[in-house]
């Protein structure tokens, strides 16, 4: 299967389905709410940032 | 401090409108007085981390589905295809550099800027259209064109892939997420090629890395949230207008 066949086989409804659902079913204020799981991942991102900055300090 | 602010702004726009981190920030830093070897490899390292971060958070904030555990999602397949063309572009540019083939930079950059301006205009003119038809052939064509332009040294990979996706019928919010992740993956290869070059006596200056990374990383988390909250109609108009600004900025940078 080449690139074209793979992409052609994709259903257009499937591409961006999450974003389309949020836009049609939820208001801006509902979309502003952040899940607990996301807060945990934000904490993970902060840890990644600190780790990279410490690595920069050590390596450079 | 101003480098952090610039990096923050351009990454914020890059992760939400799909373009501008390389095309906008690089010429600006060069204009301030930094050398290309202080800027280009640092942008590539930073973009590889921030691209992945933005991609993960676009998935987290449900702008896109990058899942691959049960079945590779359609968006991830498109990302991999766009990345593939970006990787070809890097190889092509390395081959051109190896054989010392230098195309006239001003002409190549003018051509890319005009292409971005034209695509931006077409996207604005299509704003009234309620729904777009998904055209995979067109998407592959734009991905190849973006790779070719990057390969010959004209840049504009982000703007062309982003506008190309929108013109091919991909939902704007998801298109921004796809470009972010693809740019992150392509930047890894770009930086790797710089590391190989550095083995042949070219020294990379890492002084700008902490500032650019700090601004870029914060923006890479905020912008997926911004994309989620603001309605798609806002991005429908914001993306082509920003593309017109980037295209005009590139033209000004070549001729002034």
Image (tube, coloured by chain):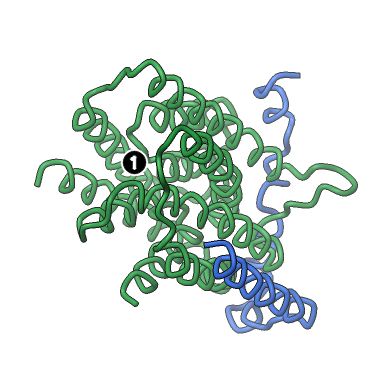
Chain colours: A blue, B green
Residue at 76 percent of width and 19 percent of height: A1
Residue at 78 percent of width and 83 percent of height: A36
Can you say whether A48 is above or below B183 in the image?
Answer: below
Asked whether B179 or B88 is in front, the reply is B88
Image quarter for residue B156? top left
What x and y, as percent, mark residue B52? 63, 56
Most extreme residue toward the right is B70
What x and y, as percent, mark residue B58? 64, 62
Asked whether B206 or B171 is in front, the reply is B206
Can you say whether B181 is above or below B147 in the image?
Answer: below
* Residue carrying label 1: B122
What x and y, as percent, mark residue B222? 54, 73
Q: Is residue B227 visible?
A: no
How many badges with numbers are in the image?
A: 1
Image quadrant holding the N terminus of chain B, namely bottom left
Residue at 45 percent of width and 20 percent of height: B95
B241 with respect to A23 (left or right): left
């Amino acid at each position: 299967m080449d690139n074209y066949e793979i992409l052609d086989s994709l259903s257009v409804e499937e591409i961006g389905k999450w974003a389309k659902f949020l836009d049609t079913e939820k208001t801006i204020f509902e979309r502003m709410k952040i899940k607990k799981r996301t807060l945990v991942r934000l904490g993970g991102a902060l840890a990644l940032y600190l780790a990279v900055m410490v690595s920069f300090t050590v390596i450079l | 401090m101003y480098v952090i602010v610039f990096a923050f702004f351009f990454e914020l726009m890059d992760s939400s409108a799909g373009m501008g981190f390389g095309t906008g920030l690089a010429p600006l830093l060069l204009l301030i007085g930094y050398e290309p070897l202080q800027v280009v490899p640092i942008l590539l390292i930073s973009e590889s981390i921030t691209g992945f971060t933005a991609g993960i958070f676009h998935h987290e904030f449900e702008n896109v589905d990058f899942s691959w555990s049960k079945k590779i999602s359609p968006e991830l397949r498109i990302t991999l295809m766009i990345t593939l063309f970006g990787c070809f572009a890097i190889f092509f540019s390395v081959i051109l550099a190896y054989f010392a083939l230098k195309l006239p930079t001003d002409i190549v950059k003018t051509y890319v800027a005009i292409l971005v301006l034209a695509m931006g205009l077409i996207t604005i003119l299509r704003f009234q259209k309620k729904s777009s038809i998904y055209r995979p052939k067109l998407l592959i064509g734009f991905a190849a064109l973006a790779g070719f332009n990057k390969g010959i040294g004209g840049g504009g990979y982000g703007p062309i892939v982003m506008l190309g996706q929108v013109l091919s019928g991909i939902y704007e919010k998801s298109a921004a997420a796809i470009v972010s992740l693809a740019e992150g993956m392509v930047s890894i290869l770009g930086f790797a090629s710089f590391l190989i070059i550095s083995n042949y006596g070219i020294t990379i200056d890492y002084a700008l890395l902490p500032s650019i990374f700090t601004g870029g990383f914060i923006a890479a988390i905020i912008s997926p949230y911004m994309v989620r909250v603001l309605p798609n109609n806002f991005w429908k108009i914001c993306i082509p207008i920003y593309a017109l600004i980037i295209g005009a900025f590139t033209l000004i940078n070549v001729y002034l």
